[in-house]
Amino acid sequence: MTMSDLMVEFHDGPHATPPPASDGPVFLGIKNVTDSGLLDLSEVRHIAEEDFARWTKRATPQAGDVVFTYEATLHRYALIPEGFRGCLGRRLALIRPNPLVVIPRYLHFALLGPTWRSTLTERVIAGSTVDRIPIINFPTFPIDLPDLATQARVVDVLGPIDDLIENNRRRIALLERMAQAIYREWFVHFRYPSHEDDELVDSPIGAIPASWETTTLAEHSTALVDGDWIETKDQGGSDYRLLQVSNIGVGSFRETGNFRYITADTFERLRCTEIRPGDILISRMPDPVGRAWLVDALDHPAVTAVDVAILTPPAPQSGLFLSYWLNSPEVLDRAETVATGTTRKRITRSVLGSLDLAVPAERDLARFSGIVGPMVRAASGLRRGSVTLTTARDLLLPKLVTGAIDVSKLDLDALLEEPAA
């Protein structure tokens, strides 16, 4: 059949961008739709409530709709969940499936499969700057679908895996909100345990508790160095993972990112700096400058690119504090202000190291680490669990949606033991 046979509605997004708002409905962007087919709402652009009607005039995304990218970054699909309230952004389109023909969740899985990817790739228009899908012709694109009973069996296998991944995402988000709330309560509003006994005194950066001391980021660190200048010709192999700006999220590491690697020979030739647990990686580029990730564990030896600085804290409890300090809105704004560049702003290592900060007393850092540390480790464990689940899903999905295996006789344990195709 063609795509038009299974859709009741089809719309592309607006060709403009509304004014941003601090809160309100979500304005979906390409970055909110991941390569693995998930809707990532950890970082969203909002629109004002009064603008919502205007930007949903053509289509209002609802649960069960499939959204996808049709220009620039292609082959990304996500299913709109229950409770979502927002509008389509630029370069996104929306499919509203006909439930009498296709189960929405099955359609989402099918669009992530190899057969559809090949169908789409054959029809991509290569532009001078970006590739795009001819959206006007999209409804005529062919697609193969099994009967509804087979679709349901596939969803019964893949759906629970996606549900577990989403459950992990929500738990991670809750842990991160709790940890950030404690950081702000203690170290922004100065309401840490026994704060009543610690009077505020003047300092070069404003009033701070008497037990704290002012310093700079470089002075408080054991080391602050640039990442390595690794060019495209240096990449390849699998010995050392190359972590780049794109792999750093808000206070976390995107373990499902698209990794690149270098060989041990390249590592030695370029005299690279190996990342160690306890280090903090800091983005020197947008978006935004200064974003940081505390390395608590690595499942593969790693180095960083030149646009990611490596900071070594003086102690583990100090590292946890610094990671939240670097990711605070106040410090990110300061980093953006001192960044330089005409086309793309960057912050130099020396300027980054010159940022002033107030360091709490050792006892308060230790208390903070004792409370927030387990939250951070739990979130990290959930992320690693999601990576394992995503790997299993990515192994199963192409075999199920192409009919390569009989879902009615699926031995899940045996299948997961097979090497990925």
Image (cartoon, rainbow, N blue to C red):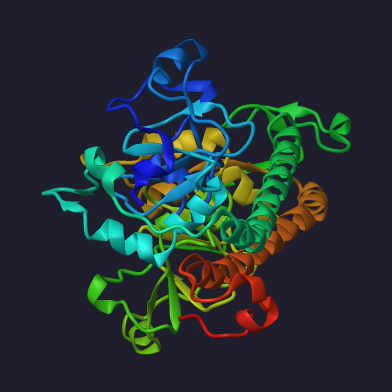
Observer able to see residue 67: yes
Q: Quadrant of the C terminus?
A: bottom left
Q: Report the side of 73 relative to 233 (left or right).
A: right
The residue positioned 71% from the left and 28% from the top of the image is 201
Rendered location of residue 65, percent (x, y): 50, 38
Rendered location of residue 393, percent (x, y): 57, 66
Please tell me whether residue 336 is drawn above or below residue 239 in the rendered image.
above
Q: Report the side of 240 relative to 83 (left or right).
A: left
The residue positioned 50% from the left and 80% from the top of the image is 420
Please tell me whether residue 39 is drawn above or below residue 387 in the rendered image.
above
Name the outermost residue toward the left: 128
Closer to us: 363 or 390: 390
Q: Report the side of 217 relative to 20 (left or right).
A: right
Determine the image quadrant of residue 136.
top left
Q: Report the side of 350 relative to 217 (left or right).
A: left
Closer to us: 186 or 385: 385
The residue positioned 58% from the left and 35% from the top of the image is 63
Rendered location of residue 215, percent (x, y): 58, 45
Closer to us: 317 or 217: 317
Count of numbered marks: 0
Observer able to see residue 250: no
Determine the image quadrant of residue 255.
bottom right
The residue positioned 46% from the left and 33% from the top of the image is 333
Determine the image quadrant of residue 388.
bottom right
Name the outermost residue toward the bottom: 265
Rendered location of residue 131, percent (x, y): 21, 50
